[in-house]
Image (cartoon, rainbow, N blue to C red):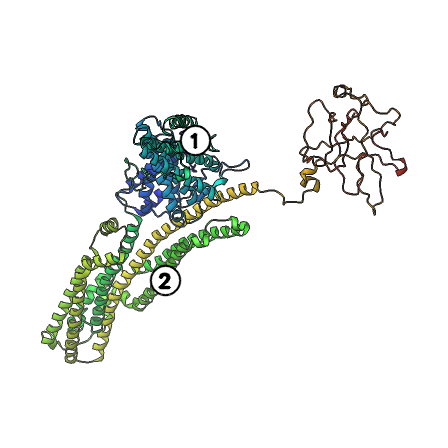
Amino acid sequence: MATFISVPLKKSSEVDLVKPLSKFVTATYAGSEDQAEYLRSVDELNKLRKNALGRPLDKHESSLEVLLRYYDQLCAVEPKFPFSENQLCLTFTWKDAFDKGSLFGGSVKLALASLGYEKTCVLFNTAALASQIASEQNLDNDEGLKASAKFYQLASGAFGHIKDTVLSALNREPTMDISPETVGTLSLIMLAQAQEVFFLKAASDRMKDALVAKLANQAADYYGDAFKQCQYKDNLPKYFYFQEVIPVLGAKHCIMQANAELYQSLVAKQKKHFGEEIARLQHAKDLVKTPYDEYVSVKDLTDKINRALTAAKKDNDFIYHDRIPDVKDLEHIGKATLVKPTAITMPLSQKFTDLFEKMVPMAVQCSMNIYNQRKAETVNRLVGTMRESTNLCNGVLASLNLPAALEDLSGDSIPQSIAEKARSIVQQGGLQSIEQLIKDLPELLTRNREILDESLKMLDDEETTDNELRTKFNQRWNRTPSGDLYKPLRAEGGNFRNLLDKAVQADQVVKDRYSVHCDMITLLCKPVDELNAAIPSANPTKTLQGSEVVNVLRSLLTQLDNMKMERETLEGEVKAVTFDMSATFLMALAQDGAFNEEQLSLSQLDQLYGTYNQRVQATLRTQEELLGQVQTSHQEFSSLKQSNSEANQREEVLKKLASAHDSYVEISSNLREGTKFYNDLTEILLKFQNKCSDIVFARKTEREELLKDLQVSIAREPSAPSFNVPAYQSNPAAGPTPAPRTVFQPQPAQQPPAKPLPPARPPPPSVTPQAASAAPANTPAAGLPSNNPPPLAPSSTAQGPPYPTYQGYPGYFQVPVGYPYGYGQYNMPNMPNMPNMPNMPNMPNMPYMQYQAPQGQGGYPGAPPAGQPYPGYPQQPPQQQQPYYPQQ
């Protein structure tokens, strides 16, 4: 009786995981200490897939362990790599487990760039292999029963998990084997078999009959539900697999009901309800007479029921005389469920170890990137605020010619501050360094534009090819359109182009500023003698030296210098702040399964930079107060100085020189930042180019696979459209058309004659069947009148027998060997209703005359078009027409 159902495994095409994953690791974790370890883990993952899917698996628990480990690893690695069509694109191809293909092409398969699809198919194989292992167990001992029940419940849980997750994992129509209706039915079948195993164990352990009956009744319910699902689902019966499964389910449903009635009859016997016992045994006997009993052996069960029924009837007839109730009046047997689908939770394997344990999930990686951007924005805002305030301070002092005005009281020497600024410019490279930086910018810009243009061109070319094929194949080209798939990449490319445009504008601003201050910067780069000669001389009064106003101004300038130095220190501290935010994100992810990146990031940044922000604001307020005091003191200082044209010219030149130095420092800083920006952007654009190249290559591979499948599909289609079948072929009941009995004569084209009817048959020959069959081929048939003229001589064109011998003719059967041309003598009654003969008038009983064919006679030619004579027949005038058969 124990016939159990198992599921075949899906087959997968080979996929190279090493190249794309290694490329991602190298690009993402460049310079990381864990990079080498991650690369080794990629190799291990590839080997694990080959072991799980690249070879036949034995029906053993060790093979199942390999599948479970690979599935667990897929679940662990999924959040750590950006598996998608437009990022890390890996195409997995799987064949339908139940479709065996056809003569002209392979089986149905589906290729998707989705790790969820790979997980679903691996889990399907896990369930299928578990069902096969369970079916191979020895059910004659407890260990085999326990193992079988465990694996059936695992298979049921895996199939049920696929039913709940397959549509969300694939985002498109799956193949029939992993469709929700198919795996839902398989899950129920596995659960029914697990319940049956528990019934067998309870029966072997001699547990209470009432419990055994309830277990069998529950198993019958499960089998009945599975049987109904297989019949109600439109697609399932199309599978040959389910054509074999449906009768087994029907048989199991009846058999388990019979077992339930059998064990419940024992309960009735114990309660001395002998009539109920007989009624239940009779019902069990009827149940085992299932129309599907040829699929499941019921001999032992039938014998057991018959023996119990015979004994029960005998005892009741001679002893108890209990009334036998009707089956409908019997109390319903209860149900007891001891099985449930195994929940699919990570990890399924007890030997699982995460190969990428140190790698953070992609959600954390993306959040880290956003956090780093927020952090960079915070740092840039603080540093930018301090630098902007410092530039404002320097501008105000340069406009007041401070501190040069305090140092130039002699009127004929270079102020100390101007001399220091000149030396600083020379040490930094002077004009040559700036001009070289300006010269390098266009080359860096051009390189970045070329990388970006080439990346977008790859997307354009692939999208053009995809659109052409979509136009050519229409609905058959059923993959994601490239235009939709590339939207994120094109948006990213547009952002890069906007960055380059803004960088070009910033470069132009720097160049314009350099052209304004170029002359003064050139003057600062000259030797001291030439610089001193270029500055106009003046003879202001030396009475200001040591005055209170000069001392106040010098004190204020010293405080401003100290404030600038404090800002430089503060800028270094702000840039040096570090914090591992990934630990915070991981903790939040582990606790809630998700986290609010913005809330966590802003809270942490406020803790890290709140104090620095307060210190920056304090320096701004200090600068504002000091500059106000400087302007007030400078007004008093200017009123004390003698006002003449030479002094004004000298002060103006000194102001320009001080401003040129500040501009030189800022321009150099801007140009170096621009160079660093272009170099950093080059690395980013190269990664973007690799990403575009990877997805284009994956799309190309997918395109070739889809084209191959389309070729197979087209090859399966009929090569010509349907056409009208001739009437004599579309009506198989009419039988073969008899050959003409006379030679056709040419008729006028305007009046085509009707097809001549066959002449009347001659009377039967007076010979026995044995004599007829033994007659030589060249001997005339017995009984023919000797005065009849012989038939016409055959024409030069070979003619066939009077009845056509076309292969495949509707209603025609081959003549047995030994009767080369004619039919034997058979008594033919009136034949108004015979399906394989043409409509003929009623004829008396008579045998067919055996036709004697000339030697070497060929097959009968095909019928000509309506109104045309048969080719090869001699054409004679109507007055010379001769009958084909001899007439009496």
- Residue 43 in view: no
Q: Position of residue 824 (x, y in %)?
A: 73, 25
Q: Is residue 54 above or below residue 369?
A: above
In the rendered view, does 156 fall on the left or right side of 551?
Answer: right
Q: Secondary structure at mark 1?
A: helix
Tally of numbered discs:
2
Q: Work out whether 274 lies above or below 83.
A: above
User: Cβ–Cβ below 8 Å for labels 2 and 1?
Assistant: no
- Precedes in sequence: disc 2 or disc 1: 1
* Crowdedness near tag 1: few (<14), some (14–19) or many (≥20) residues, C-alpha within 10 Å: many
The part of the image, by quadrant, that contains residue 275 is: top left
**What is the quadrant of the C terminus in the image?**
top right
> How far, Cα to Cα, is label 2 from label 1?
93 Å
Q: Which residue in the protein does label 2 denote? A: 504
Tell me the crowding category of disc 2: few under 14, some 14 to 19, or many 20 or more residues within 10 angstroms, Cα based: some
Q: Amino acid at mark 2?
A: Val
Residue located beneath label 1 in the image = 285
The relative height of residue 263 versus residue 347 in the rendered view (above or below) is above
Residue at 29 percent across and 68 percent down: it is 517
**Secondary-structure class at tag 2:** helix
Q: Position of residue 259 (x, y in %)?
A: 38, 32
Q: Nearer the viewer, residue 708 or 392?
A: 708
Q: Quadrant of the N terminus?
A: top left
In the rendered image, the residue lying farthest to the right is 879
